[in-house]
Structure formats: structure tokens, C-alpha cells
Amino acid sequence: MASEKKDIRALSKQELRDFFERAGDKAFRGNQVYEWLWNKGIHSFADMTNISKETRAQLEDNFVINHIEVDNLQKSKDGTIKNAVKLFDGLIVESVLIPTKTRTTACVSSQVGCSLDCKFCATARLKRMRNLNPDEIYDQVVAIHKESLLYHGRPLSNIVFMGMGEPLMNYKNVLLSIDKITSDEGLGMSPKRITLSTSGVPKMIKKLADDQVKFNLAVSLHSAIQEKRELIMPFAKSFTLDDLKESLEYWYEKTKKIITYEYVVWDGINDSLEDIKALVQFCKYAPSKVNLIEYNPIDDGDFRQADAAAIDLYIEQLEKNRIPVTVRRSRGKDIDAACGQLANKH
């Protein structure tokens, strides 16, 4: 059961300074504690070695550190690592370390379960239990950074919000976590190395633009035909392609950052020339690139990977229209760590 003491990481640096001043101590003590919590990422007051035992006992009496624990770690034959992350209240999310020759990427979760209902995604079959707190998102990144150093001999280089949950349905906490990740008082990572992936929530995409965020935006598109997108992603009835188009034009106008469209091609669903033409047209509304993603089955046969000829036709038509396109091969399939497979099976 969760403690009734306040989670100390919910406090700002100024609030920590105020706490110590009220206790008759020096305000700078708050700075020291803040550095231990975020820059050094400790999970126990006992580890704050430059602070007196009395002060540590005082913190223990008043606060808790609701840190995550890696409950189960699985390694794929391709070097991918999947973490089952246990939260302070016993709930579980999953995060993934994806290594390549040139980079190591952390794929992190933002919700326990998901708010949306994409038919091809295992996470969408889980009920959304709650949003993750900023520190729980931050802790996933810290854990993967340590694993990257331990197993691959290099620091974490990139972060994608493509794990469990819809990040824009946990807007405030996701942005607070990114603030900490990019802060010099946190991990000091460049926002250019962070990508937020959304299923497409137009109102919140506009809010991102208004908030002048510096990270990258990716959109799970999968069809540029409204009726088909609704079959693949039923929530698209509420978030239409017309509204999405308008929000992405607004995003580019405000940020001047190109959009990545994530796009899985399925056999008999979106593998026709009509589908390709619709995607090409959609890409022309705002500067963009397309990431064609290999499909990872989730136990049933409703969705099947399209054949190579269909993928080649997409690539040919996109390149013909001068739209940058890459094909992303799945990593970690053997441990259910690939795109769309995160479902706490263990």
C-alpha cells in the first residue's frame, strides 16, 4: 500500500528550499537534496552522503521516494532489452532499450494501459489504470541509461515516447518529465534527441506548438483515408483526419519542425494504390517524412504484414514525390518488445 507521506519528487527545488527554511535549516540544503534526487537519481535518503544523519532522518520522517523497480529484465538475441517496471503501487509498465550500431534508444511508457483503442496494438487491449507521474517516466530513462552502459558500453543517446499509453493523454506529466530529462539538473539530454509519438490528438498537438516544445513529433497515421483509419483506430471517429491535418499544419507553422508519420502496411487493409496516393497527398500538407514499420502480430490473424511488393510500391511512390521514407525493421520480437507488442504478458 502506498505511504501517506508525500513523494519528495513532487516538490520543486524552491519548495524543498522552503521546507528546510521552515525547519530552521539553511535553504541551500534543498538544492543538495534536489541534486541527489534528479541529477544523481538516488532512491534512498540514506544515499545522500553529504547530508547529516539528522537531516536524512528528518526527510525520512516527512517524505518517501516512490521509485520504480525493474521487476523483470528480458534480453533479445538482437541486443534489445525489455524491462517490466514495477511502480510504487504495484502496477506494471514496460520499457525497452533498442540498440543499433550508432545509437541506443529508450522506448518509454506514459500510462499504465492505454486510453485509446488501436486494433493492432496489444497495449490497447489493456484497461487504462492511471497516468504515470513525471518521476516514473524519468526513472524508466535512468534505468535504460544504466543498462545501456552496462550491456552496450555506451550512454543512452535517444528517447522515444512510444511505449505503453498515449503521451498526449498525460500531457502535463509527460512534459514535466521531459523538462527534467533535458535539464542540466537532470539528465541534460538535448530535446532534439527526444521524439514524442502520438496516435493523433489534434487539440493537444496544437497545445504542443503553443508551448513551443523543442522535441520531435511523430504521428501514428496508418491510413490517410478517414473510413479506413476508423477501422484500424476507432477513436479516429472523434479525431478526424481533417482536424489532424489542421493541427499538423499549425504545428509546423509554429515550430518549423518536420513531422514523422509512422505507418504500418497491412495485407488487404491499406496496401492498395489508392492508400498510397492518399498518404502522398497527406504528406504535402506539412513538411514530413514517412517511417514504414514492420508489423508485429499480437496473437490473432486480423492484421497481417503486407508483402514486400506493397512496401516497395509505397517506397517508390513516396520517393517519386520527394517525400523522405525509411523502413524500420522490428527489434526484440522474440521477447514481445517490438512496436505494438507491449502488454505485460509476463
Image (tube, rainbow, N blue to C red):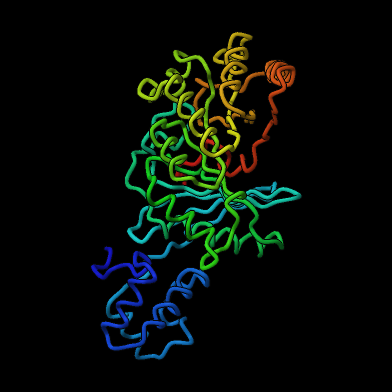
Residue closest to the eye, 174 or 89: 174
Residue 341's place in the image compared with 73, above or below, is above
Q: Quadrant of residue 37?
A: bottom left
Residue closest to the eye, 75 or 85: 85
Q: How many marks?
A: 0
Q: Quadrant of the N terminus?
A: bottom left
At 69% from the left and 30% from the top, the residue drawn is: 327
At 45% from the left and 62% from the top, the residue drawn is: 69
Q: Position of residue 329 (x, y in %)?
A: 68, 35
Q: Is residue 97 left or right of residue 316?
A: left
Can residue 260 be seen here?
yes
Residue 110's place in the image compared with 51, above or below, is above
Q: Position of residue 46 (x, y in %)?
A: 43, 82
Q: Quadrant of residue 4?
A: bottom left
At 55% from the left and 36% from the top, the residue drawn is: 218
Q: Position of residue 278 (x, y in %)?
A: 57, 14
Q: Is residue 261 left or right of residue 342?
A: right
Q: Position of residue 127 (x, y in %)?
A: 34, 38
Residue 297's place in the image compared with 173, above or below, is above
At 52% from the left and 65% from the top, the residue drawn is: 186
Residue closest to the eye, 292 or 33: 33
Can residue 165 be seen here?
no
Q: Is residue 216 left or right of residue 114?
A: right
Q: As drawn, which residue projects farthest toward the front?
A: 253
Q: As drawn, which residue projects farthest toward the left?
A: 4
Residue 11's place in the image compared with 110, above or below, is below
